[in-house]
Image (tube, grey):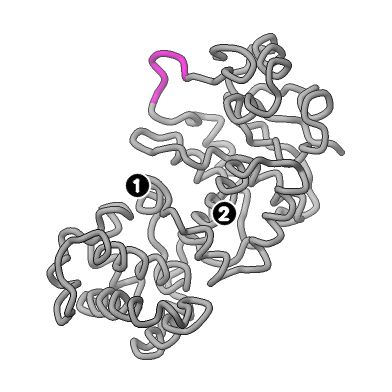
């Protein structure tokens, strides 16, 4: 339901709601129609030789020359730690390490001594552990490993994931996303959120922005609505912008998201020009843009969440 009006309008879950915002028969039907991509058994980057992988990671675009000395320490530690685990690929070694179950903030804690073996800089200071985390994130962006969505969302997506993914993996795709979000008037916060969401999908599924599927978007949205997941991304227009880029093909049908109310006037009367960007934004995302008009009319419509109708 809607609480408040105008800039303070926000959506809250009804009492007794389950841990996921979208579940049950409706979600099962959507999953059958739009399944997410599964994890490939192997791919080129995860089969790279240790020396070749390290050399690649120490060169632009992965690592700038000015940061090479410091980043080398972290990369040597993380790659060496992964190499100690069984497996024929870096992905198999990552899965064997057990770190995927610990989340992106704490994966290093149980293995800190091993990660620092042979290093001149030891300890658990922020600078040391930050270098380890950044180094692992670079391996993710370089597609050497693909952590699970649970790891990527716990406690929330790594802060620099979108910027690193755009630089290392898909500069053109993220530049296009950014330009389209800017063109449709998205705020800086919403733009960052959509880019982080795209980067999260690429980190877990591999590929480029153009490879994202409807099922990938649905899977991420469902997981972010689960218990214990901090909703930092909240949809924020990614689905609509990908639609406008032609990523999902020529079918421009709007997916009837479970639990959402269609408010036809939204794109035309309140936020003209945001037709595609607004499809997945929620009531609380829109409140600061549309003010009292949106809060009042959303409340009149009785919508808990909103799904704008796209123009033909």
Above or below 165: residue 152? above
Say which mark, if any, is on residue 198.
2
- Whether the magenta-drawn stretch holds residue 75 is answered as no
Magenta range: 13-18
Q: Quadrant of the N terminus?
A: top right
C-alpha span from label 2 to label 1? 16 Å
Say which mark, if any, is on residue 197.
none
Q: Is 223 situated left or right of 294 in this image?
A: left
Instruction: Find residue 214 and report its horizontal and vertical position in percent.
Output: 62, 48
Q: Is 27 situated left or right of 98 in this image?
A: right
How crowded pointer 1 is (Cα within 10 Å; few <14, some 14-19, many 20+) is rated as some
Q: Residue at x 39, y 24 (%)?
A: 18
Of residues 301 and 55, the one drawn nearer to the viewer in this rendering: 55
Going from the N terminus, do you reach mark 2 or mark 1 first? 1
Instruction: Find residue 248 and report its horizontal and vertical position in percent.
Output: 71, 53
Q: Hey, which quadrant is residue 225 in on the image? A: top left
């Amino acid at each position: 339901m809607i609480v408040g009006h105008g800039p303070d309008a926000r959506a809250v879950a009804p009492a007794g709601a389950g841990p996921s915002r979208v579940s049950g028969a409706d979600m099962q039907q959507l999953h059958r129609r739009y399944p997410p991509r599964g994890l490939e058994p192997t791919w080129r980057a995860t089969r790279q030789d240790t020396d070749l992988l390290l050399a690649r990671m120490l060169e632009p675009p992965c690592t700038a020359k000015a940061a090479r000395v410091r980043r080398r320490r972290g990369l040597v530690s993380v790659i060496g730690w992964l190499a100690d685990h069984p497996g024929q690929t870096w992905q198999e070694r990552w899965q064997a390490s057990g770190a995927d179950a610990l989340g992106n903030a704490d994966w290093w804690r149980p293995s800190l001594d091993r990660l620092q073996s042979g290093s001149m800089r030891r300890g658990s200071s922020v600078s040391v552990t930050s270098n380890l985390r950044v180094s692992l994130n670079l391996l993710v962006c370089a597609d050497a490993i693909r952590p699970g969505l649970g790891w990527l969302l716990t406690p929330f997506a790594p802060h620099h994931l979108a910027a690193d993914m755009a630089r290392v993996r898909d500069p053109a795709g993220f530049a296009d996303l950014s330009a389209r979000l800017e063109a449709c008037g998205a705020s800086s916060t919403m733009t960052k959120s959509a880019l982080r969401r795209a980067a999260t999908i690429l980190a877990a599924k591999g590929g480029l922005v153009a490879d994202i599927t409807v099922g990938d978007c649905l899977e991420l949205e469902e997981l972010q609505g689960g218990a214990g997941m901090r909703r930092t991304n909240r949809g924020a227009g990614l689905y609509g912008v990908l639609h406008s880029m032609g990523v999902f093909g020529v079918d421009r049908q709007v997916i009837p998201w479970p639990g959402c109310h269609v408010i036809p006037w939204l794109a035309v009367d309140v936020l003209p020009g945001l037709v595609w960007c607004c499809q997945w934004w929620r009531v609380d995302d829109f409140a600061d843009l549309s003010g009292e008009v949106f809060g009042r009319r959303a409340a009149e419509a009785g919508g808990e969440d909103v799904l704008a109708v796209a123009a033909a």
